[in-house]
Amino acid sequence: MSTVLIRALFTSLLAPAGPALPPVVSRSPLVFFHVDSGGCEACSLEVEALRKGDYGLAEAGIVFTDAPRVADMLLVTGTCTRMMAPVVKAAWEAMPQPKGLLAVGACAIDGGPFAENYAVLGGLEKRASVDCAIPGCPPTPDAILQGIVSLLSPTPAPIMEA
Amino acid sequence: MSIPPILFGGALVTQESSRPSVRALVRNGQKTETAWRFELTEDAWFDLVECLRDDPAVLLGLWCDGKAVHAFFNEGGVPGGEVGLRPLMASLALEGPRYRGFSAIRRRAAPFERMIRDLWGIEAMDAADTRPLVDRGAWTVTAPLAERPVPASGMTDMPEFSTPDPLVAAQGMVFSRGPASGGTEGPVHFRLGVANGRVRTVETLTGFAHRGMEARMAGVSLADAAGLSGRIHVGATLAHQWAFSAAVEQAVGMTVAPMIGHIRAMLCEIERIYTHLTCLARTADAAGAEMLAARLYKARDILSRVCQAAIGRRLLLDCVAPGGVTLAIAGHEQLHEDVVLEGLRTLCEEIAVFGTGDFLDIQALWRATGVVTSALVGEGQVPRSLADALMLGGAVGRSCGRGADLRQSMEAYSGVRIRTPVAIEGDAAARCRIRFEDIAESLRMIAAFSAMFTAEDEAERASFFTPVQVPQERCEGYAAVEGPDGLICHVVILQAGQVERTFIAEPAGVLQSVQETALQGCSPSKFDAVRCSFGVSVAAVDL
Ligand code: SF4
């Protein structure tokens, strides 16, 4: 994936009929729902550092919620275990349109060190259209923030380096 | 008033213990090529289980490899003090899908027995806890590590939850939380039965984070296994890397330079500070002390930034490997020992600044924050008897008066005074206080290590990393490290130039069951704060 795609943006721009939905990127604040779908917890710890630390998220119009039904973006960390797959799917389905998917860390992208096995499905890359992938094992909070900010910018940004 | 013994026939009959010790029983078994491992017959295994009723030996781990179950003990009690680890491993060749379990006598064994059942389909007879630990019917197969795994039916034969408590059923409510709550607890599900304003029952559904660490760390290269050892869970990544690496070094008979030991120990103390700060931040946040939580989160983040700048590792992943330490100093392509030492000295200096400034302010703020005190004092009490029965260590064990600390006997800590903080209250407030005191002790130790990193001795400048050649013939090694939440232990088997198998013992499994018990009786509004004070990682429970 060479560019960051905003599926929701395209949906709203290209949909020929129906009520015009505001693109995800124009919403303020942009609401994230975070799911850790099974990793070593380093990526979720870095997301937590970003949420709770001095990174100015609120000022940038980024908030996190406890309820997927009010979220614009699903932020996934960790490889997708078979037990978590229906949970991730349910969270995604509970989110209103338009919505986007953010994969943070090697696990969430392609399974990283936790590729498919009896208990694990692997990363999201092959199973869903990921709008923003932030590589790293784990990526730093700065890299995650950069990825999120790229979603907010109207021009597609190149994929982030950890 | 003491009553003198009544003498029959003029002779005092003393009760001679006819039972042999665990040590004697295990060592009576068939010798193996590993000096500390013995193969037992089924009868001897039964005797061993019975013998544990009144022997101080501690069960450190219980694992299976499909052909045998292996019980790993420390002779004479919890390792620590002057003595350190005195390992003894008993192996029982399996003749069927059952073996006599330990959990009825040693409750520590329960998470291991549950894991063996889920992964191998081998059941512990007489088990104290027969609930699944990680297999909830979502896997492709049951008993995935068995020689012939069975395709999964999609349902487990165990009830997902036990029937509700009568009082909860009559006049209470059941609340569920997770496995995707948007919070910080990770993928785990809690079900709370609440009645009369108190949590009466707590059930924890684990397994959502199971990645199959045991399978992934079997039949792989040393480098791959070392990388995975740091990804068991981030809260003890360094401790696991160290335990794995030291076990490999022990297996191949390699001794690393003292300086490498000191670097590992220093990094392990940084990890302790990290993990305690994270746990305290989550606890404060859950108690509603947002400003305090923000200070704690910020402190942890600053330390991570300092680590990133000084040694190129923000969260201490990939720092230790068999044969040494693998630090990358930002801006230096060549990993030169002098540069590493300089980076470590800078790191120690920066941490000292935190210790004399921010840390003291945060500690004072914690004491002065009423909402934290009222949420934690007297809540989530762990009785001393339970702590003793489970031989708890870490902050939870120490807050119940248990002071065993493996660091006291570890070579890597030689030259550094170890003072292990202990409290007796056993509640959530005491656990948090111990974490603060632990941080203070770690800061003191880091300052002591800092002085060692200035050594100009040429002998100390031995390479910080010497690759380990894994032999073709089978060899086994063990190591234990005092992690942030208790003893972490690895047993590795090397063969044919690779890691044949890795057995991991993590304190999280036992802590999770203690947490379940201790949270009963707490007020629902305090549940999260009290839960956070245990600092249980689901990735570590599920493996
Ligand atoms: S990507 Fe790496 S750091 Fe992140 S959860 Fe997975 S293993 Fe851990």
Image: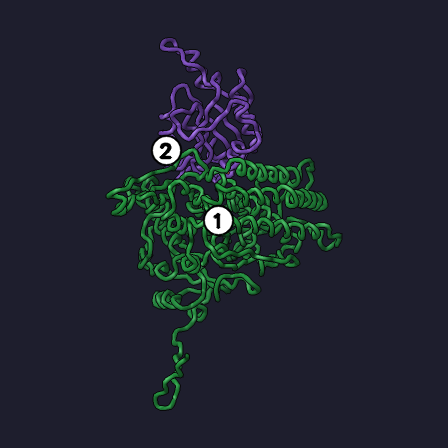
Chain colours: A purple, B green
Residue that extends furthest to the left in the rendered view of this protein: B170
Q: Amino acid at mark 1?
A: Ala
The answer to whether residue B301 is seen in the rendering is yes
Distance in Å between CA atoms under marks 2 and 1: 34 Å
Q: Position of residue B477 (x, y in %)?
A: 52, 57
Looking at the rendered structure, which numbered label has been put on residue B429?
A: 1
Q: Nearer the viewer, mark 2 or mark 1?
A: 1
On screen, B251 above or below B340? below
Q: Nearer the viewer, residue B309 or B432?
A: B432
Q: Is mark 2 within 8 Å of ligand 1?
A: no
Chain bearing tag 2 is A
On screen, A43 above or below B482? above
**For the residue labelled by badge 2, is the local secondary structure a helix, a strand or a loop?**
helix
Q: Amino acid at mark 2?
A: Val
Looking at the rendered structure, which numbered label has been put on residue A12?
A: none
**Residue B379 vs residue B451: left or right?**
left
Chain bearing tag 1 is B
Residue occupying image coordinates x 57% and y 42%? B365
Where's the C terminus of chain B, which quadrant? Answer: top left
On screen, B182 above or below B69? above
Q: Badge 2: how crowded within 10 Å, few (<14), some, or many (20+)?
A: many
Q: Position of residue B49 (x, y in %)?
A: 37, 65
Q: Nearer the viewer, residue B113 or B496?
A: B113
Q: Nearer the viewer, residue B231 or B436?
A: B436
Q: Badge 1: how crowded within 10 Å, few (<14), some, or many (20+)?
A: many
Looking at the rendered structure, which numbered label has been put on residue A87?
A: 2
